[in-house]
Amino acid sequence: MMKKVITYLKTLMIEKTSLDQLKAFYLRFKFTAPI
């Protein structure tokens, strides 16, 4: 049971980091790209 929870948390953390990276990339793109 505990192992499942840890795996789940790890997955959440990985997803959150990739989300933050995507957000940062999007913001950087938005501000640098001439629209």
Image: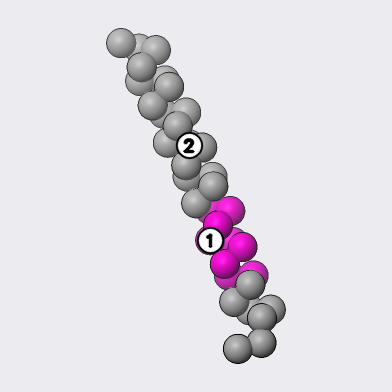
Residue identified by numbered label 2 = 13
Q: Confirm whether the magenta stretch covers residue 2.
A: no
Q: CA distance from mark 1 to mark 2?
A: 15 Å
Name the quarter where the C terminus is drawn: bottom right
**Is 20 rendered above or below residue 4?**
below
Q: Which residues are magenta?
A: 20-28
How is the structure coloured here?
Answer: one colour
From the viewer's perspective, tell me whether residue 31 is left or right of residue 7.
right
From the viewer's perspective, tell me whether residue 3 is left or right of residue 18.
left
Quadrant of the image occupied by residue 31: bottom right
Residue identified by numbered label 1 = 23
Residue 32 rendering spot, x and y as whole percentages: 69, 79
Give the amino acid type for the residue marked by disc 2 in the picture: Met
- Label 2's element? helix
Q: Residue at x 57, y 67 (%)?
A: 26
**Is 9 rendered above or below residue 24?**
above
Name the quarter where the N terminus is drawn: top left
Residue 9 rendering spot, x and y as whole percentages: 41, 28
From the viewer's perspective, tell me whether residue 10 is left or right of residue 5.
right
Mark closest to the chain's N terminus, 1 or 2: 2
Residue 18 rendering spot, x and y as whole percentages: 54, 47
Q: Are marks 1 and 2 in contact (CB under 8 Å)?
A: no
Count of numbered circles on the image: 2
Q: Main secondary structure of the magenta part?
A: helix
**Is 9 rendered above or below residue 34?**
above
Q: Residue at x 39, y 12 (%)?
A: 3
Q: Residue at x 35, y 20 (%)?
A: 5
Outermost left residue = 1
